[in-house]
């Protein structure tokens, strides 16, 4: 049969085209399996390019220059200088009170001015959340605690736990606190007699861990008498794991078995979980521990499951061990650097009775309260906090789309903001506790005088307990010992999950006449 040449040509082309499609797919499939690294790289590059094109439509703040995809990671390095770098970025790029940076493919908006920060804080805890931080540690016990919980679960846990940490109940824990303090003073006595110096970086975390256990469940961990660092190391391993996972571009912990191989906190969590479970099984008390306050709440119809109770005790232990101890290490370092301040504080402490001290007695020494406030302002353990908005918000006239990572740069506010300078002086770059003392006593400057503990509904539950512990340690040490003048180079800081002294705070000491 006769067929026009044009028709024949079109049909043949369609036939050839159809036969080529499966062949092309076969070649593509073969190439992907034979060159998986190249295929992955090309796919990742495509995703990043698409992401970059989409981000061009976002309202931009002033941006910290960085490397493609990695962003500021090369400049920050391992993260050990993160707090200092963030201060530098806020100085250089934060004139509007907010700026942004790229970090391993993630846009991060940094609030370093109070107007922008307060806008974010007013939306907590539901419209601005922790941004799924708990998703990075689902296999660790403290992921069940109030620190990482969100929404209805957080509301319930906060309602149950809050009464155990109010000022009245913190005062009821004084016998437990003082019993552990006696062991701490014995350890200092021994160091002074045998070596003439002490390592506060070693002793203070042991003290904090023992205090958490004693006030939490009425049991002694016994770290101070044994000079044991085991539980302290476990806490640091867990914090290290949390920090590593937050910085990781890939959720490696979701791969079965990999977390146990890579994360020291995984094994540490198992050991700590076993110890705290044993303590819960054998807890006793007379109504003067956190656990007993929670039991009372249970009789009134509010209770936590065993897993949630364990998780919250783990949070208390992890959060209370390194934060207070690092702040106290900085405080003793500053007192060793400033002998005149040390002697002035010691003279005021003479008005306190010997022996055990209650919170209201410590409050009567103005310079002691000022010393603790200035330590938290200048050396706060957590210089910034990471959150995520769940709906669009407007900062500095620009819209921030939902699910953007936002960093709240607390330290910069406390050390540089006009609001702080107007109330406490222009010299915020130096350590000067007297700035907190006015004609009528301690200067109240909410919320800036408590930003070290966060702000609003999600402010740290253990704030009053930490204040009591910090002040009683400073008071009892300075009443009994003189810290010799610091003659070594100025102490640098490092940033892990928290900010801490770059070296052990080892100070020579002698008994006070």
Image: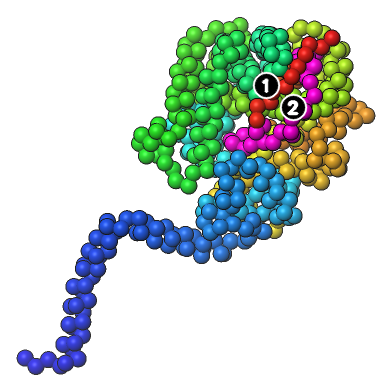
Farthest-out residue, right: 439
- Circle 2 — which element? helix
Quarter of the image containing the N terminus?
bottom left
Work out whether 391 lies above or below 180.
below
Q: Position of residue 476 (x, y in %)?
A: 76, 14
Q: Where is residue 365 in the image (x, y as percent from the top left)?
A: 84, 19
Local crowd size for mark 2, using a 10 Å CA cut-off: few (<14), some (14–19), many (≥20): many
Work out whether 503 lies above or below 63.
above
User: What span is in magenta?
Assistant: 475-502
Whether residues under marks 1 and 2 lie with C-beta atoms below 8 angstroms apart, the answer is yes
Instruction: Read off the residue under disc 2.
Output: 333
Left or right, 5 with reference to 113:
left
Q: Residue at x 76, y 7 (%)?
A: 355
Q: Which residue is drawn at 68% across and 26% down?
A: 505
Quarter of the image containing the C terminus?
top right
Farthest-out residue, left: 1
Left or right, 490 with reference to 183:
right
Count of numbered labels shown in the rendering: 2
Q: Where is residue 448 in the image (x, y as percent from the top left)?
A: 76, 37
Question: Which is nearer the N-term, disc 1 or disc 2?
Answer: 1
- Circle 1 — which element? helix
Q: Where is residue 440 in the image (x, y as percent from the top left)?
A: 91, 27
Left or right, 435 with reference to 224:
right
Toward the viewer: 363 or 513? 513
């Amino acid at each position: 049969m006769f067929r026009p040449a044009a028709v024949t040509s079109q049909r043949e082309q369609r036939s050839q085209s159809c036969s080529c499609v499966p062949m092309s797919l076969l070649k593509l499939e073969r190439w992907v399996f034979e060159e998986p690294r190249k295929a992955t790289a090309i796919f990742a590059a495509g995703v990043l390019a698409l992401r970059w094109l989409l981000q061009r439509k976002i309202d931009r703040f002033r941006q910290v220059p960085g490397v493609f995809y990695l962003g500021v990671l090369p400049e920050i390095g391992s993260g050990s200088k993160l707090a200092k770098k963030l201060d530098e970025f806020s100085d250089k790029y934060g004139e509007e009170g907010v700026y942004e940076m790229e970090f391993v493919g993630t846009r991060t908006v940094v609030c370093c001015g109070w107007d922008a920060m307060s806008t974010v804080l007013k939306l907590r805890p539901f419209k601005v959340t922790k941004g799924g931080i708990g998703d990075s540690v689902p296999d660790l016990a403290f992921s069940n605690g109030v620190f990482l919980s969100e929404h209805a679960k957080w509301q319930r846990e906060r309602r149950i736990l809050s009464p155990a940490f109010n000022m009245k109940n913190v005062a009821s824990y004084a016998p437990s606190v003082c019993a552990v303090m006696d062991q701490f003073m014995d350890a200092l006595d021994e160091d002074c007699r045998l070596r003439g110096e002490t390592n506060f970086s070693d002793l203070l975390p042991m003290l904090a861990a023992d205090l958490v256990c004693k006030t939490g469940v009425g049991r002694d961990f016994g770290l101070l008498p044994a000079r044991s660092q085991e539980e302290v190391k476990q806490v640091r391993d867990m914090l290290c794991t949390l920090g590593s996972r937050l910085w990781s571009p890939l959720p490696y912990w979701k791969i079965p078995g990999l977390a146990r191989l890579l994360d020291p906190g995984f094994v540490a969590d198992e050991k700590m979980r076993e110890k705290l479970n044993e303590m819960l099984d054998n807890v006793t008390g007379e109504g003067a521990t956190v656990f007993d306050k929670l039991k009372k709440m249970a009789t009134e119809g509010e209770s936590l499951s065993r897993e949630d109770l364990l998780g919250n005790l783990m949070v208390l232990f992890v959060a209370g061990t390194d934060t207070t101890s690092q702040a106290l290490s900085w405080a003793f370092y500053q007192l060793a650097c400033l002998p005149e301040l040390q002697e002035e504080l010691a003279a005021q402490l003479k008005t306190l009775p010997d022996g055990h001290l209650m919170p209201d007695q410590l409050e009567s020494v103005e310079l002691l309260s000022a010393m603790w406030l200035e330590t938290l302002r200048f050396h706060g353990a957590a210089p910034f906090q990471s959150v995520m908005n769940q709906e669009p918000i407007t900062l500095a006239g620009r819209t921030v789309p939902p699910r953007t990572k936002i960093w709240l740069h607390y330290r910069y506010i406390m050390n540089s903001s006009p609001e702080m300078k107007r109330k406490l002086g222009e010299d915020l770059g130096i350590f000067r506790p007297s700035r907190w003392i006015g004609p009528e006593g301690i200067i109240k400057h909410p919320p800036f005088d408590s930003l070290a503990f966060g702000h609003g509904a999600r402010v740290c539950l253990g704030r009053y307990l930490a204040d009591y512990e910090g002040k009683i340690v400073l008071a009892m040490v300075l009443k009994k010992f003189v810290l010799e003048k610091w003659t070594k180079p100025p102490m640098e800081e490092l940033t892990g999950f928290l900010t801490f002294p770059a070296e052990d705070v080892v100070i020579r000491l002698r008994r006070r006449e």
